[in-house]
Image (cartoon, helix red, strand yellow):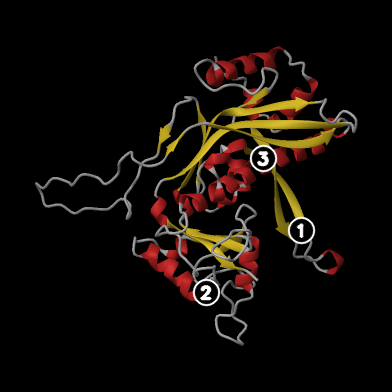
Amino acid sequence: MELNQTMVETDNSLANAIRLAVRGKPDDTERRDQSELQRRYYSSPRLPRANDASVLIPLTAKVPVQQRLLTTGAGSGAGLVAGSGVMLPFGDALRQASLVGRLGGTIVTGFESVGSVTLPFFGETGSTLEFLSEYAEASESSVYLGGDQLTPKRAVATVQTTRTLIQNSDSLNQVSGDLVKAIAEGIDKVVFAGVPAANEPNGILTRFPVGNAQCLSLGTNGGELTFAKALEAERMLAEKGIDPKTCAWVLSAKTREKMKRTPLVSGQPIYLADTLTGMVSESPSFPHIGLPDDLEKGTSGPVLGSAIFGDFSQVCVIIWGTVEVLNNPYSRDTSGLIRVCGFVHLDVGLRNPGRFVVFKDVVTA
């Protein structure tokens, strides 16, 4: 049975799903679509549903995405931000909303099997080109299935709206966008600093503890992230054949602030992180709330920042099944609010962990 094309291709399909979750009365076509999605993704022994009353959304469904452009006009409106709405499939909208996606990470959607997925490992230097004589045999590839093993982990994002706003299409599109943004930001956080003990995927910072060769030390009690240390991180990856121009820095908020006011030469207005572009040497830098500023080392107290430098194209995010949208009209009944939950099953891993360097003891004061 094929999914109804109206559901898959309608511009407001995610918004319609939220409206359907609130309304709770599917028509015949919507009921058939839900039955097919249930059969495809959630029939035993596949994924468990969060709730039988939830509405299932295929990840090919389109959602509204707001694009922002700076105006070039003169007068009082000069320099204001103008918005332009476009419709993208849920997976593409997620890639655009996610910092990991914008840095080249892979986000794979639509896995039907509930089984685990093992990522291929390409060796420290990746795939290579080999030249052969006429009758020579090629060497065995260094690629093998010995990388991270990914298994579905249940996660939920919640947004709130009102019964009045849910009737307005623009407001409903905003709720849809908020749900996509919440899922994307959650993915970024666990990619950077997920903690398996908290039922999260293993994040990059967690993967490399203090003392690991890929966790560079700045001092017994922490220290400043200097230009020399930034170049050391570049050298470590360059020795594995990785061009720093293809890499990026992801920094905690206080670390990035400190780097943008640390001069490369005392008294000169040239800083470790460029004040206009954010470039650190040859690589761009980005702040993210997922990186902590309250780490400890020695006698420092919980005041140290963190940083990740690496090739984020090595990040792989796999999403199983669909997005389940569930409306809870009761938890905020006294305030007239409606809480909308979006459930997903996902996991994250690294194809080559050796292409990252981390700092977990950055003095930011």
Horizontal side of residue 185 vs 219, given as left or right: right
Q: Does residue 39 lie above or below 195 as drawn?
A: above
Q: Amino acid at mark 3?
A: Val
Q: Does residue 246 lie above or below 28 as drawn?
A: below
- Please report contact status of discs 1 and 2: CB closer than 8 Å, yes or no: no
Tag 2, which secondary structure?
loop
Q: To which residue does mark 2 refer?
A: 226
Frontmost residue, 233 versus 98: 233
Q: Earlier in the sequence, mark 3 or mark 2?
A: 3
Q: Marks 3 and 1, Cα distance to the nearest angstrom?
A: 22 Å
Frontmost residue, 122 versus 11: 122
Q: To which residue does mark 1 refer?
A: 81
Q: To which residue does mark 3 refer?
A: 180
Q: Does residue 299 lie above or below 178 as drawn?
A: below
Q: Quadrant of residue 174?
A: top right
Of circles 3 and 1, the one toward us is: 3
Tag 1, which secondary structure?
strand
Frontmost residue, 365 versus 230: 365
Whole-percent x, y for residue 337 in the image: 85, 33
- Please report contact status of discs 3 and 2: CB closer than 8 Å, yes or no: no
Question: Residue at the location (50% across, 50% down)?
Answer: 206
Tag 3, which secondary structure?
helix
Q: Earlier in the sequence, mark 3 or mark 1?
A: 1
User: Where's the N terminus, which quadrant?
Assistant: top right
Question: Residue at the location (78% across, 32% down)?
Answer: 339
Of circles 3 and 2, the one toward us is: 2
Q: Marks 3 and 2, Cα distance to the nearest angstrom?
A: 37 Å
